[in-house]
Image (tube, rainbow, N blue to C red):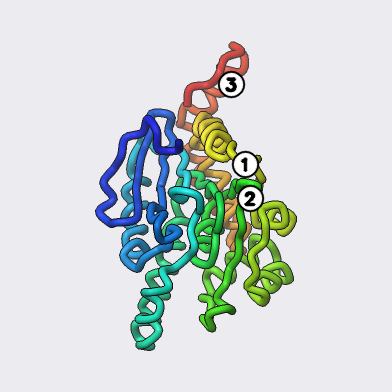
Amino acid sequence: MLTVDRTEIESGVEGLRLAVGEDGVAVLLIDRPAKRNAVTLAMWQALPGLLAGLAEDPRVRVLLLAGAGEGFSAGADIAELLHVYGDPERADAYHATNVAAEEALAAFPRPTIAVIAGPCVGGGCQLAIACDLRLAESGARLGITPARLGVVYPAVPTARLVRLIGPARAKYLLFSADLVGAERAAELGLVDEVVATGQLGERALTFARTIAGRSPQTLGAVKDVVNAVTVGDDPQAAVEPWERRSRHAPDVREGLAAFVERRPPTF
């Protein structure tokens, strides 16, 4: 449903699909349903470049990240990890690639929303957490499971998880390596909205289109300032470029005129 009536963009890598619609919504689909949408090394490597290309596309105002079929992602491809952890240098390189993909998603300049159905585990959950927001179907299950595998979870995703849900809740998930249902994930702060079964795609598109209709100037400023606060940077320094730009940009004039004229704004 998410990719219907959208123009497909060649991703250049098996397992990832891109599509952009005239509604301003782009969809990045993890597309390996036969492997529970496990993410391969090639997919991790491709993500920064794909995201950079989308960031340059003027049509894109919101990005949805989703999984094909009945699940979001089971995480990293375990068959690959068996080979990776046979060589310390290869393991270091793999983690660096993994973190670079996560950082590229977190740095994407437009709002990002993870659309979570079914399992969202390990590296899949890592990608979902790197998004700005997470919508989950009521039957979804989320967890971060390196403690089951003996893997040391990298500092970057660990810190991001702590900032999102707090230290004790992060330890709860990482210590136990258990999967939690969508409702429990919402209680923990891991999920922002739980959607009834069968309604996730429609809700995600409706919400994304709402955001796409808001002022890109305001959204960009909000994202930069909130991110600055989250990592302990100066929020004033983050907002100043946007404030200077706003004095000459048409967004405020259009927004105020639309309000007075009782019509939707066209940003």
Question: Residue 197 — which label?
Answer: 1
* Dots 1, 2 in contact, CB < 8 A: yes
**169 left or right of 267 in image:** right
Residue 215 in view here: no
Residue at 31% from the left image edge and 65% from the top image edge: 42
Residue at 71% from the left image edge and 52% from the top image edge: 183
Q: Is residue 11 above or below residue 215?
A: below
Single out the residue that lies furthest toward the top.
Answer: 261
Q: Which residue is mark 2?
A: 139
> Residue 15 at what x, y percent from top left?
34, 56
Is tag 1's residue or tag 2's residue first in the polypeptide sequence? Answer: 2
SS assignment at label 3 = helix
**1 left or right of 237 in image:** left
Residue at 63% from the left image edge and 73% from the top image edge: 177
Q: Which residue is mark 3?
A: 256
Mark 1: few/some/many CA within 10 Å (<14, 14-19, 20+): few
